Amino acid sequence: MGSHGRELILDARNIAVDFKVEGGIVNAVRDVSFQLHKGETIALVGESGSGKSVTARTVMRLLTRRATISGKSRITLGGKDILKLPDAGMRKLRGNDMSMIFQEPMSSLNPIYTVGAQLCEILHLHNRISGAEAMKRARQLLEDVQIPEPEARLRQYPHQMSGGQRQRVMIAMALANRPDVLIADEPTTALDVTVQAQILNLIKDLKSKYGMAVILITHDLTIVKRFSDYVYVMQNGKVQEHNTTEALFANPRHSYTRHLLASEPKGSAKPIEANSPTVLEGKDVKVAFTLKRGGFFSPDFFELVAVDKLSLNLKKHETLGLVGESGSGKTTFGQALIRLIGNQGGEILFDGERIDTKDRKAMRPLRSRMQIVFQDPFASLNPRMSVRQIIEEGLIVNGLGGNSRERGDRVRQALRDAGLPDTILNRFPHEFSGGQRQRLAIARAIALEPEFILLDEPTSALDLSVQAQIIELLRKLQAEKGLSYLFISHDLKVVKALCHRVMVMQYGKIVEQGPVSEVLENPKTEYTSRLVRAAFEIAA
C-alpha cells in the first residue's frame, strides 16, 4: 500500500538508459524513480528531449537495440520485475497487464487492415474466444470509446476516420484486455482543442470505469493540472522535482519547474493606429473543389465548398487570428489569399492592387512582399541545403541583393533578427531542434523584407517554452519591421497572446469575429464557446 492508502501497482527504481550513437554514448535517462498506485494518474512532464518517452518505452520494453538499460534499474509490476522477464513473458504482459497509446494514431494503426480486424487480433492474442465473440467484444469497445455507428466503423480502414476517431480506436485497442496500467504518450498533441478535451475526458472516465492507473506523458501544463494526481518534472533525463499536482502548481521549488509554469502564452497585442492602411483584403472569396464518388462506370461528381464567400480586412502592423477545428477551411482560405491556390469567386487585393486575376508570372514581383511560415519546419526546409542556401534561395529567385557578398550580409542579418547566431551558415536542418528550425523558417521569410506573413500553425509542434520564445520573436519583428500577420491556429492561448482580432471558422464560413478579448472572453456562438472551454478549461 502507498502512503495514501492505495495499492501499489508499478514501482520503477533507478531507471537509466544509454544510447549508442555515432561519436559516443547519450545518457537519455538517468536514475529516474517513480511509483504508480491503483486508480491514480501520474504525469511525466518536460520539454522535447527530456527523456519522458524513453522512460515510458523502458517500462514497456519497447526500446531499440541501440539502447542499454542499467543493471541497477528495477521496474516491478504486480510483483514481477519486468526487466528480467523473457521476451515471451513480456509479450504476454503487453496489452494484457499494461498498454500504451502513442502520439500519432495513423502511424500506429495498420493501413491495410480494417479497424475490426485489428481489434480482434488483440483479443485473439490474449484470449481463447471465437471470431464471432471477438467481433462482438470489438463492437462493445468502440461503444465504450464513444465512436458513433460502431457496427459500420468495424468495417472501415484507418484512413477513412478522422484524427480523433483514430485516437479513440487506439484507446479501444489499448483497453481491449482491461490492463492495470495505461501509458498515454502525448495522446492529444496532433488533435484539435475540442477533440483533445473529448479524448482526455474519455480516458478519465474509462480509468474510473475499469479501475486503471494511468501514466500521462505531456508538455501541456493545462492538461497536467486538470487530469493528474501526481507530477514528475523531467529535464535532461533526470527528475528535477516531483509532488502532488496541487502542491507543485501552488509552490514549484525547482527553477526549471518555475520556468515551465512561466512559459504559458501570456500578454496581449499592442494596439495599432486607428488609421492604419489596409495591407490585405478579401471580398466574398470562394474556394471549391470538385470531388468524385461512385464507381468507375457510374461516377458522380460533386462540388465541395471549402471557403464560402468570406471577406477579410488586414491592416498594417495588425495580427489577425484565424481559428477553427481541422477541416474548417482556415489553411485553404489563407493560401487562397496569397494565391498559392486559385479561388472560384470574389476579389483579393494586396496593397490596394487586385491580385486574384494575376497568373503565376504576374504574381512573381509581389512574392517577396508576402511570405508564409508553415506548421512543420522540418518538412518545409530542404534537408540537402545548408542554412545559407535555404535563406539565400529566395533572394536569388527574386533578384534581391546585388552580389554574393550583399546576399550573404542579408542572410546573416535575417539570422540575427530571428534570434540565431550568424555562424551557422554551413549547417543543415537536421542539426537543429524544432524551435531552431522554426526560427530558420522565419529568417527565410523576413530575409525578403516582406510586408505580410501568413503564419500557418507555426507554434503547434513546439514545446511551451519554445512557443513563448517564438511568440516574443514575432512580436519583436512586428514592432521593428511593421509587419502584418495572418495567424492560423487552433491554439486559442497563443491567439489571445499574439492577435489583435480573431475570426472563427466552421465548415468554410465565419461564425464569429471581433477583437480578441471580446470574442474569447464573451463568445456569442455556441461553437466559439466550445472552442474556448476546450482550450482554457479542457472541457468538451
Image (spheres, helix red, strand yellow):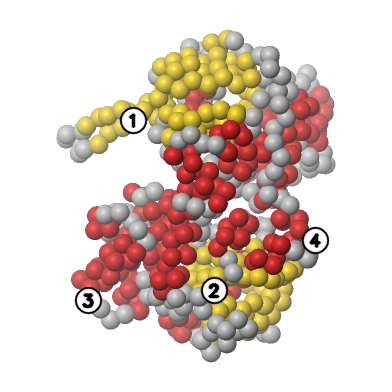
Disc 3 marks a residue whose amino acid type is Ser
Question: Of helix, strand and loop, which one carries label 4?
Answer: helix
Between 411 and 278, the one lying in front of the other is 278
From the image, state whether disc 2 or disc 1 is nearer to you.
Answer: 2
- Counting residues from the N terminus, which is met first, the one under dot 1 or under dot 4? 4
Give left or right: position of 404 versus 373. right
Q: Give x and y (percent) for residue 40.
A: 54, 74
- The quarter of the rendered structure image containing the N terminus is bottom right
Q: Which residue is mark 4?
A: 255
User: Looking at the image, which residue is at 47% across and 48% down?
Assistant: 194
Label 2 – label 3 distance at C-alpha: 34 Å
Can residue 380 be seen? no
Q: Quadrant of residue 267?
A: top right
User: Looking at the image, which residue is at 58% across and 66% down?
Assistant: 228
Give left or right: position of 126 versus 463. left
- Counting residues from the N terminus, which is met first, the one under dot 4 or under dot 3? 3
Disc 1 marks a residue whose amino acid type is Leu
Classify 10 Å Cα crowding around label 1: few (below 14), some (14-19), many (20 and above).
few
From the image, state whether disc 4 or disc 3 is nearer to you.
Answer: 4
Q: Quadrant of residue 139?
A: bottom left
Query: Does residue 407 sit above or below 190 in this rendering?
Result: above
Q: Which residue is mark 2?
A: 40
Q: Which residue is mark 3?
A: 130
